[in-house]
Image (tube, rainbow, N blue to C red):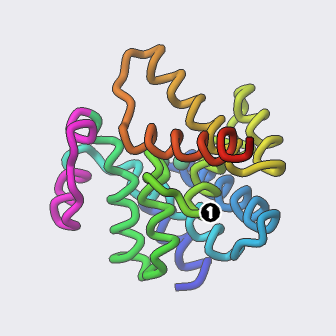
Amino acid sequence: MDYIEIKDKLKKMITEKRYEHSIGVAEFAKKVAYMYDYDVEKAYISGLLHDCARDMNIEGLREYANMCNIEIGEIEALHPLLLHAPVGACIAQKEFGINDKDILSAISSHTVLNKTPTLLDKIIYVSDLAEPGRTFEEAKKLRDVVFKDIDKAVIYAIDVSFEYLIYNRKMIHPVTLFARNLLIKEVYYDKN
Ligand SMILES: [Fe+2]
Ligand SMILES: [Fe+2]
């Protein structure tokens, strides 16, 4: 599939607002990838498709998760919307013909990240929060930090999401916590 076909198909799967956000993430991810010498095409496609399952209903997400053998953990069972990330990766593969494992990983891990995130996972995780359509203060700061230090940007993005979760008395996913500890150690402990 070329970009035009991917975009046409994606447009039919998500709302107009979500589509604009997806284009924003794709464009922003491309700039970040360029900055860190990463494959800009892979970053663009990952950004484009990261939310392809975001407008499915809960039942659809659960059905798709079963079909794709996606494990539904305790937190996913309580917050089934989280499934849109791994289900999105499954749809990217099955319906968009994407077989690149880095792209599928970045889509699959864009909400809770994964224990040992790759550069592309980090680019998409940060771009999701930092794309220009996000107008809150934290997004503005993130747009600045990401071009200076991607790991610090990921830590900051995680912290923003944790602050929200704590304030709203929601559970913190252990995978995100693991990734944060790993990055904190790499960035702030190992360098001293
Ligand atoms: Fe998402
Ligand atoms: Fe998103």
Dot 1 alpha-carbon crowd within 10 angstroms: few under 14, some 14 to 19, many 20 or more: some
**Could you say which is closer to the camera, residue 73 or residue 13?**
73
**Residue at 77%, 65% in the rendered image:** 36
* Mark 1 secondary-structure assignment: helix
**Could you say which is closer to the camera, residue 189 or residue 75?**
189
**Residue at 72%, 51% in the rendered image:** 150
Q: Is residue 77 above or below residue 119?
A: above
Quarter assignment of residue 99 = bottom left
Q: Is residue 155 above or below residue 109?
A: above
Q: Is residue 141 above or below residue 1?
A: above
Q: Is mark 1 within 8 Å of ligand 2?
A: no
State left or right for residue 134 relative to residue 49: right
**Could you say which is closer to the camera, residue 166 or residue 61?**
166
Q: Is residue 77 magenta?
A: yes
**Residue at 19%, 65% in the rendered image:** 69
Circle 1 is placed at which residue position?
119
State left or right for residue 45 relative to residue 35: left
Q: Is residue 111 magenta?
A: no
Which quarter of the rendered picture does the C terminus lie within? top right
As drawn, which residue projects farthest toward the bottom? 1
**Could you say which is closer to the camera, residue 75 or residue 9?**
75
Q: Percent x, y for residue 185? A: 59, 42
Number of numbered markers: 1
Dot 1 amino acid type: Leu
Q: Percent x, y for residue 3? A: 61, 78
Instruction: Tell me which secondary structure the magenta stretch mostly adopts.
Output: helix
State left or right for residue 185 relative to residue 153: left
**Magenta residue span:** 60-78
Q: Percent x, y for residue 136? A: 70, 27
